[in-house]
Image (cartoon, rainbow, N blue to C red):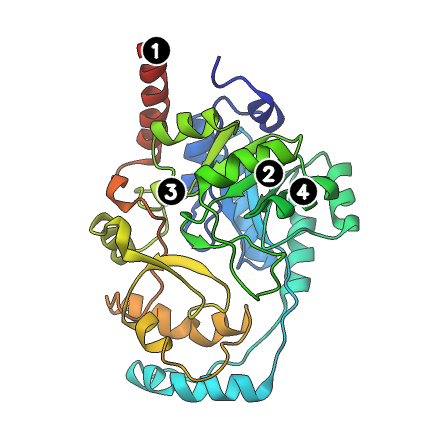
Amino acid sequence: MWNDNDMTERLGVRYPIIQAGMAGSTTPQLVATVSEQGGLGTIGAGYFNAEKLEKEIQEVKQLTDKPFGVNLFVPSENHYLPDQVEHMNAWLKPYRRAFNLEEPVVNVTEEIQFKQAIDMIIKYHVPVCCFTFGIPDHETIQKLKEAKVTLIGTATTVDEAIENERAGMDLIVAQGSEAGGHRGSFLNNGKYEPMIGTMSLVPQVVDAVSLPVVAAGGIMDGRGLLASMMLGAQGVQMGTAFLITDESAANDLLKNAILNSKETDTVVTKVFSGKYARGIHNAFIDEMNQYDGEIPDYPIQNQLTNSIRKAAAKDGNPELTHMWSGQSPRLAEKMHAAMIMDKVVSQVEERLKQN
């Protein structure tokens, strides 16, 4: 049976399909629907405070009794440099003026927020916790393991996968460069951005670790799932495919942009948040590429541009907000999340019958 392996057993799911924890774009309805259909729905809690996460967990639990996960951003070592922030604020001033926005106050509270999220996961017996941007400390990992939480790490290189295994993760998502949104890189110290494609990354990670490997990056249908399994992965994580579903919290501006884009329209940039992410190319990226200083680290830059991006999205302006998307927008179809799950499973089973 193609769907009976270590991945599905460890996660307690029927099918080896994870809905990516897309921060700001998941809803309890999306998470619960994917889980109900046999996959692993994931709350994208990267920006949530404790109260918001608690509410989302409670809502998901009301909608399903199936396993689901919470995706968290591991706190990064950020450097707040006042001169750097002042210079960026001066550059962003015309954008804020256009939307009548005040200059934001930067509040770096990642560590506190992360610890509170861990406590919520344990309190509500969330079955799975996924990590992006790094690996939590040993104490956090032990706390979660004692609470019987299954842990999923993210790797964009073989070395990152090895570090995830050493740290005690239960599964590893091998995130290829085709993936939309933020990159899960953490060993490069910001000096460069590893851009290994999914087809290249997955078999190398599979050969280097003993844990179940989950392929991610540009996977939109059953063909991608089968191809990933041929490379040695035990399943897939899909983001963009679920981003445009009816249950997604993504706005229509983004959904329509993805549906009307092609594979050459996305770029990897850190101008929006200070951390590299893949999205649809637009005017803000072009203009920020002319910036004459160092872009502040994440989450500082993310906070500096946040109100601009929100105002632009509200105004229906796709040129001044982030438009996260993977590299396979031509394969995107707007439908209910349950239909996405049904489509992927039926495609896999149909192709296996043909062989």
Q: Label 1: state its secondary structure.
A: loop
Badge 1 local density, few (<14 within 10 Å), some, or many (20+)? Answer: few
Q: Amino acid at mark 1?
A: Asn
The amino acid type, in three-letter code, at marker 3 is: Gly
Q: Residue 226, image x and y in percent?
A: 41, 25
Q: Nearer the observer, disc 1 or disc 3?
A: 1
Badge number at residue 162: 4
* Circle 4 SS class: helix
Give the percent coordinates (x, y) of residue 305.
Answer: 42, 74
Residue position for label 2 = 172
Q: Nearer the viewer, residue 51 or 17?
A: 17
Q: Earlier in the sequence, mark 2 or mark 3?
A: 2
267 over 59 or under it: above or below: below
> Is residue 82 or residue 179 the one in the foreground?
179
Please rate how many residues cluster around mark 2, counting C-alpha atoms within 10 Å: few if below 14, some from 14 to 19, many from 20.
many
Q: CA distance from mark 3 to mark 4?
A: 23 Å
Q: Work out whether residue 308 or residue 212 is closer to the camera in this orientation and state it.
A: 212
Q: CA distance from mark 4 to mark 2?
A: 9 Å
Q: CA distance from mark 1 to mark 2?
A: 29 Å
User: Which quadrant does the C terminus fall into?
Assistant: top left
Q: Which residue is mark 1?
A: 355
Q: Secondary structure at mark 3?
A: loop
* Mark 4 or mark 2, whichever is nearer to me: 4
Name the amino acid type tagged 4.
Ile
Label 2 to label 3: alpha-carbon separation: 17 Å
Could you tell me the amino acid type at mark 2? Ile
Mark sitting earlier along the chain (3/4): 4
Q: Is residue 173 above or below residue 343?
A: below
Of the numbered discs 4 and 1, the one sitting upstream in the chain is 4
N-terminal-most mark, 1 or 3 = 3
Q: Is the C-beta separation of discs 2 and 3 under 8 Å?
A: no
